[in-house]
């Protein structure tokens, strides 16, 4: 009788153990299936959600694009808890699980394009005036009404001084000037295509540096100066200019957009302590 009970409970345990293992397999398969969809055009990817713990890690990661991509897959874009410790060894383990999955190579290439080329925050730090401060908010999809009701696809960088042409704007990456000129909703803007393929869009400028389309730039090079907090309508200035350049990222490949714009707030947080410096010189 005792032997029968032991066999009975052993059978229940094996069934339960198999059920747990099978559930884990189902969860893994479900996670891997996320790559079967066009992930980079989904709202969750475009929002670029990154927790504070992950932000701290990314500032010292050797391959931030790969690791943030793994983080999103493992957490379903922060809808689940991260499985384990946020650490290099933890991400190496995840990488071994994901690297051979269909769709991984294209997905991680997009993540690296957004994250790996960034070297500097776009607004330098002033050497002269402690009041020459800037701030920014994650204004992704905030409501905008100019030109029709829509979501804002950018990151607002706000300046303490509302003085057009005072604050310099520098390139966050190496790259090439891809676009330059006026846009109805973006005002005077310049676009830089970085080496890995992301297009960095700097809008609402007051003026430009001496750059033309096709010119190469290095991270930290001057692109222009921030505009002021005002709205112009009519004539050549029929758009909006802000004290902050709402700043966007979008990805381009082979000269065509294959990915919609994504939020730049998390990337800004990653490099907010890596600033160039500027000094106002009166001539």
Image (cartoon, rainbow, N blue to C red):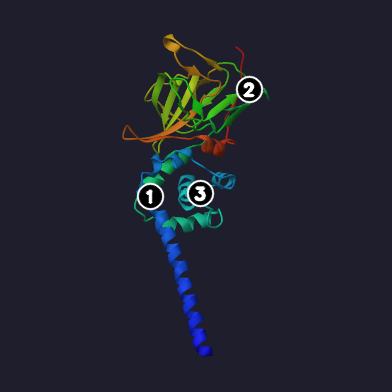
Q: CA distance from mark 3 to mark 1?
A: 16 Å
Secondary element at image label 1: helix
Q: CA distance from mark 2 to mark 1?
A: 43 Å
Q: Which residue is mark 3?
A: 79
Farthest residue to the top: give it: 235
Q: Which residue is mark 2?
A: 160
Camera sees residue 5: yes
Within-10-Å neighbours for mark 3: few <14, some 14–19, many 20+: few
Secondary element at image label 3: loop
Within-10-Å neighbours for mark 2: few <14, some 14–19, many 20+: few
Residues at marks 3 and 2 touching, judged by CB atoms closer than 8 Å: no
Between marks 2 and 1 in the image, the one whose residue lies nearer the viewer = 1
Farthest residue to the bottom: give it: 1
Secondary element at image label 2: loop
Farthest residue to the right: give it: 130
- Residue 180 percent across, percent down from the top left: 40, 21
- Residue 130 percent across, percent down from the top left: 68, 25
Front residue of 1 and 199: 1
Q: CA distance from mark 3 to mark 2?
A: 36 Å
């Amino acid at each position: 009788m005792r032997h029968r009970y032991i066999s009975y409970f052993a059978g229940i345990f094996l069934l339960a153990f198999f059920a747990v293992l099978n559930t884990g397999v189902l969860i893994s398969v479900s996670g891997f299936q996320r790559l079967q969809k066009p992930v980079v055009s989904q709202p969750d990817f475009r929002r670029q959600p990154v927790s504070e713990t992950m932000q701290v890690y990314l500032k010292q990661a050797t391959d931030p694009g790969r690791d943030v991509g793994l983080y999103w897959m493992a957490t379903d874009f922060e809808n689940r808890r991260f499985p384990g410790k946020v650490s290099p060894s933890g991400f190496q383990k995840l990488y071994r699980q994901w690297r051979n999955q269909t769709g991984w190579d294209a997905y991680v290439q997009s993540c690296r394009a957004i994250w790996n080329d960034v070297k500097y925050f776009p607004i330098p730090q002033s050497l002269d005036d402690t009041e020459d401060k800037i701030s920014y908010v994650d204004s992704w999809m905030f409501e905008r009404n100019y030109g029709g009701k829509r979501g804002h696809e950018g990151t607002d960088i706000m300046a303490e001084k509302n003085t057009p042409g005072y604050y310099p704007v520098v390139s966050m990456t190496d790259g090439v000037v891809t676009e330059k000129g006026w846009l109805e909703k973006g005002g005077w803007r310049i676009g830089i295509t970085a080496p890995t393929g992301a297009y960095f869009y700097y809008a609402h400028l007051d003026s430009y540096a001496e750059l033309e389309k096709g010119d190469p730039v290095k991270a930290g090079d001057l692109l222009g100066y921030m505009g002021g907090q005002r709205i112009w309508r009519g004539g050549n200035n029929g758009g909006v200019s802000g004290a902050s350049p709402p700043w966007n990222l979008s990805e381009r490949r082979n000269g065509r957009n294959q990915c919609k714009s994504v939020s730049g707030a998390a990337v800004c947080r990653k490099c907010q302590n890596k600033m160039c410096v500027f000094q106002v010189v009166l001539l």
